[in-house]
Image (spheres, rainbow, N blue to C red):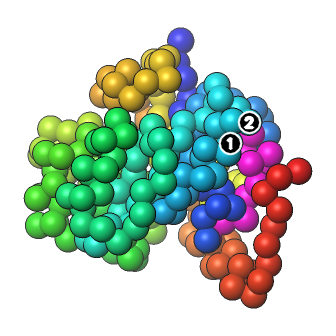
């Protein structure tokens, strides 16, 4: 038996997404997504909310902007604030028992990308590297992440980085069934396969529109 796992997905709790929890759960049913990690920017509140709605579906996560680049965490218990050093952020996540990856580490178009020397400093303190992100515009940036992970003998994760409807399940981790437990998830990730498909470059427009709407005062209700 193989589970289809989305490891990187956002909701309207992220400043650049308008997607409601109910829509995400419907898309998971339609696209046969077994588990989905909700990894909103700098907050776990949306993931915690969805975990209460669908405990067998949702993994609580967060994408955290540190002072040097973004980290992607799974099995988070509470929100971790942005802007801290990578070392301090990792320490807080470890205290929560989280599994830690590095999202789109070398994406040249993202503010959260890492300098390689900064990433080298923390490589022994993280569990995985995101080696394929469906939103990366330049395929070479994903290829560089894969080469980096192989060089350091660290597991690779893949994810859609979904922000709006068509993206959820675009890229999936194919994993053996795992318990709702960080270590079992990490063990399953080490032997996982991947189903990777790049998103259209136009998906970034959806995030820009979401930011504009929220800055203009639009507030989509978070509950039905």
- Residue 131 makes an appearance in the image: no
Residue 60 numbered tag = none
x, y (%) of residue 50? 68, 42
Camera-side residue of 183 and 102 = 183
- Residue 144 in the image: above or below residue 95: below
- Residue 89 in the image: above or below residue 31: below
Q: Which residues are magenta?
A: 16-25
Q: CA distance from mark 2 to mark 1?
A: 5 Å
The residue to which callout 2 is attached is 53
Camera-side residue of 195 and 156 = 156
Residue 87 figure quarter: bottom left
The residue to which callout 1 is attached is 50
Q: Which secondary structure, mark 1?
A: helix
Q: Which secondary structure, mark 2?
A: helix
What residue do we see at 88% from left, 50% from top? 224
Contact between labelled residues 1 and 2, with CB atoms less than 8 Å apart: yes
What residue do we see at 26% from left, 71% from top? 68
x, y (%) of residue 173? 47, 35
x, y (%) of residue 38? 57, 47
Left or right of 20: which side holds 172? left
What residue do we see at 74% from left, 36% from top? 53
């Amino acid at each position: 038996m193989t589970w289809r796992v989305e490891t990187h997905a956002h909701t309207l709790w992220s400043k650049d997404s308008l997607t409601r929890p109910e829509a995400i759960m419907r898309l998971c049913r339609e696209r046969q997504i077994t588990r989905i990690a909700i990894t909103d920017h700098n907050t776990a509140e949306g993931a915690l909310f969805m975990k209460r709605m669908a405990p067998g579906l949702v993994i609580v996560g967060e994408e955290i902007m540190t002072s040097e680049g973004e980290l992607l965490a799974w099995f988070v218990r509470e929100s971790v604030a942005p802007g801290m050093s990578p070392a301090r952020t990792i320490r807080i996540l470890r205290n929560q028992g989280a599994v830690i990856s590095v999202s789109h580490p070398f994406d040249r178009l993202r503010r959260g990308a890492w300098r390689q020397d900064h990433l080298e400093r923390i490589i022994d303190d993280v569990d995985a590297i995101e080696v394929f992100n469906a939103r990366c515009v330049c395929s070479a940036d994903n290829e560089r992440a894969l080469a980096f992970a192989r060089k350091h003998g660290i597991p690779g994760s893949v994810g859609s980085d979904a922000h709006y409807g068509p993206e959820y399940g675009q890229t999936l981790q194919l994993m053996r069934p795992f318990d709702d437990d960080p270590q079992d998830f990490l063990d399953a990730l080490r032997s996982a396969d991947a189903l990777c498909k790049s998103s259209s470059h136009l998906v970034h427009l959806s995030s820009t529109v979401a930011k504009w709407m929220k800055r203009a005062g639009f507030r989509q209700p978070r509950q039905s």
